[in-house]
Amino acid sequence: MGARPKRAPKRGSWGFWPRVRARRIVARIRRWPSIVSDKPKLLGFAGYKVGMLHLVMVEDRVGSPFYGREVVKAATVIECPPLLVLGFRAYAKTEQGLKSIGEVWASDPPRDLERVFTTPEKFNTEEQLKKIEDNLERVEEIRLIVATQPRRSGLGKKKPEVFEVKIDGGTMKDRLEYAKSLLGKEVRVTEVFEEGQYIDVVAVTKGKGTQGPVKRFGVKILPRWHKHRKGYRKVGTAGPQHPSVMFTIPRAGQMGFHQRTEYNKRILVIGTKAEEINPKGGWKHYGIVRSDFIVIEGSIPGPAKRLIRMRFPIRPPQVQHSGKPKIVWISVKPIMAEVR
């Protein structure tokens, strides 16, 4: 930033670099946590962002000065239609990383899957399953191939999103049997998460197009009455020209539509009755919730209708809570509700 008469903070964080558009609107989860469980379990789910509300709950965080008292929280609603299990894939560990050694697909995929890619006329289910079972000692991970069902939501959308979800817990043989039992079936959010649990949220943020350094990095606006011969909403100096201008200088460019991960968001409510969460006239920019939903404390990335991927926390917090959250009132309800 050049010579300064006093100290100034660096503009922009290298934790979010490069600031380019995400490759896909469906977020990619690059790491999955490991859990200790006797039974195999899915480690993630997905849903569509509905909007935000506020609610009144009883503070149950042990050690909080408001413990046992009613507090107001901002929260986000995510509609979570059941995920359809299309197949599963087995991965082996190699020097180049995880490599697929076989995948098994359900024999009757939905017609909407043709909107994503061309499905084969015949599936070699038995052949691929035998190949995985013969190489079970090499298998490092088993992941389900699932598809969303936007027709079951209030989006008015037909094209599903297809992605993978890891299975963990139990032995590798248990995971294989669990994956076989779910083939071609639906998985609901109540089977994966529970109220009071912490999760990680992965999504693509709201796109804002090309923006200048003032909005993009928060640089200071120069004085308008002097010392701004070539503009005042710009960086004062771009640094040395030789050998080249440093890439660390805040410049104009893409802002928003970046993939971001927010850690340790707490689930306050998991609901199965959509009428409990729908306001009169529906949600602004979304419509009417028609399927299962969850309410997460705080805000999450992305605009309304954006696909939100969720997973078990990869670095869970050391926070103690006294049981499940006790919700007193939600802002979409016209009258006070009983303590849950």
Image (cartoon, rainbow, N blue to C red):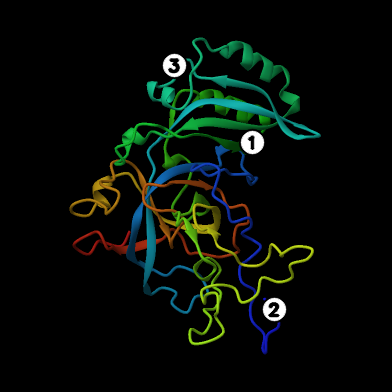
- Mark 2 burial class by Cα count in 10 Å: few <14, some 14-19, many 20+: few
Residue hosting label 3:
108
Give the secondary structure at mark 2: loop
Q: Quadrant of residue 127?
A: top right
Could you tell which of marks 2 and 1 lies nearer the N-terminus? Answer: 2
Residue 233 vs residue 242, the one in the foreground: 242
Split into 4 quadrants, where in the image is the N terminus?
A: bottom right
Q: Quadrant of residue 165?
A: top right
Residue at 49 percent across and 87 percent down: it is 225
Residue 39 in view here: no
Which numbered tag is attached to residue 2? 2
Residue 202 vs residue 32, the one in the foreground: 202
Which numbered tag is attached to residue 170? 1
Residue 321 vs residue 292, the one in the foreground: 292
Residue at 44 percent across and 20 percent down: it is 109
Disc 2/disc 1 C-alpha distance (Å): 57 Å
Relative to 196, is 182 above or below? above
Q: Residue furthest front?
A: 229
Residue at 22 percent across and 54 percent down: it is 279
Could you tell me residue 310's position as x and y percent? 50, 47
Q: Amino acid at mark 1?
A: Gly
Labels 2, 3: front one: 2
Could you tell me residue 181's position as x and y percent? 52, 24
